[in-house]
Amino acid sequence: MLFDTHVHLNADQFEDDLTDVIERAQEAGVKEMVVVGFDKKTIHKAMALVEQYDFLYASVGWHPVDAIDMTDEHLKWIEELSAHPKVVAIGEMGLDYHWDKSPKDVQKEVFRKQIRLAKKVNMPIIIHNREADQDIVDVLKEEDAGQVGGIMHCFAGDMDMARECLDMNFHISFGGPVTFKNAKLPKEVATQIPMDRLLIETDCPFLAPHPNRGKRNEPAYVTLVAEKLAELKEVSYEELIEQTRNNAKKLFNIS
């Protein structure tokens, strides 16, 4: 039984065949998934999905690329949604320096506001990081985000960064890139992450694992991530999926 900690079943890419995608995930042994909402449209769709399927949970937050669009009303709305029994985390939030839609200072302010909200409602956070390693770590430290901890989603940093995140009570989650043939760094880092802090994800429809790289990703493919991590950690597939599922349920406070 696998737990995919980061899916975007609320994405337009799944509009035509969502039922089939969910069925394939269940057939592959995916027991639970967290649908991540990161703006007004995707949060609405995430909440509708968790009402429809008992094995889906939601995370609600605001993506750094769209930080410039977030208002205080949006933040208040996210706080209200955090009380919903199927909302298990705040995010995804963080910093993304690849795209320049939102200035860095605006991204940081929105990031800080969401960390403070998560501490207020006592929920873990899901971190998006793209080309912003040091600033991510600095903001997490300055805001004492370790109080709630959370997930470094689709981790792509080095082991030094991973240690700092582990020290701040964060879990390290790996997705499709850990299976890529040329992905040396994620593989090296994965071998060193303690088993009780390891999580798996797809980030579907993005970052499909090998041999589906370049195609639309879906939750059923989380099995490929788990297989690669089991190989890297030198443990059985069964042990890997049991441990990562237990880690996720404990972090998200799912009984």
Image: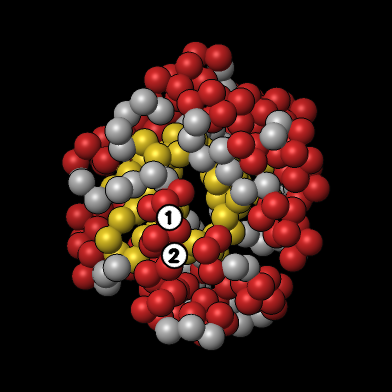
The image quadrant where one finds the N terminus is: bottom left
Quick check: marks 2 and 1 in contact, CB under 8 Å? Answer: yes
Q: Is residue 207 visible?
A: no
Circle 1 packing at 10 Å, graded few (<14), some (14-19), many (20+), is many
Question: What element does badge 2 sit on?
Answer: helix
Who is closer to the viewer here, 87 or 27?
87
**Local SS, label 1:** helix
Q: Residues within 10 Å of mark 2 (few under 14, many from 20)?
A: many
| Residue drawn at the location 24% of the way across and 58% of the way down | 22
Image height of 32 relative to 42, above or below? below
Q: Residue at x 74, y 65 (%)?
A: 159
Q: Is residue 97 left or right of residue 152?
A: right
Relative depth, front residue between 151 and 196: 196
Residue sticking out furthest to the top: 73
Tell me how many marks there are.
2
Q: Position of residue 25 (x, y in %)?
A: 27, 64
Residue 18 in view of the camera? yes
Residue 200, horizontal then vertical, whole percent: 47, 64
Q: Is residue 102 above or below residue 228?
A: above
Q: Quick check: 44 above or below 11?
A: above
Measured in 3D between alpha carbons, the distance from the residue under mark 2 to the one under mark 1, in whole angstroms, is 6 Å
Q: Amino acid at mark 1?
A: Ala
Please state which of residues 253 and 17 is positioned toward the viewer in this rendering: 253
Q: Which mark is residue 248?
A: 1
Residue occupying image coordinates x 39% and y 60%: 246
Name the residue that disc number 2 marks. 244
As drawn, the label of residue 166 is none
Q: Please give left or right for residue 119 compared with residue 189 in the image.
A: left
Q: Amino acid at mark 2?
A: Thr
Tell me which residue sits at (56%, 80%) in the image. 233
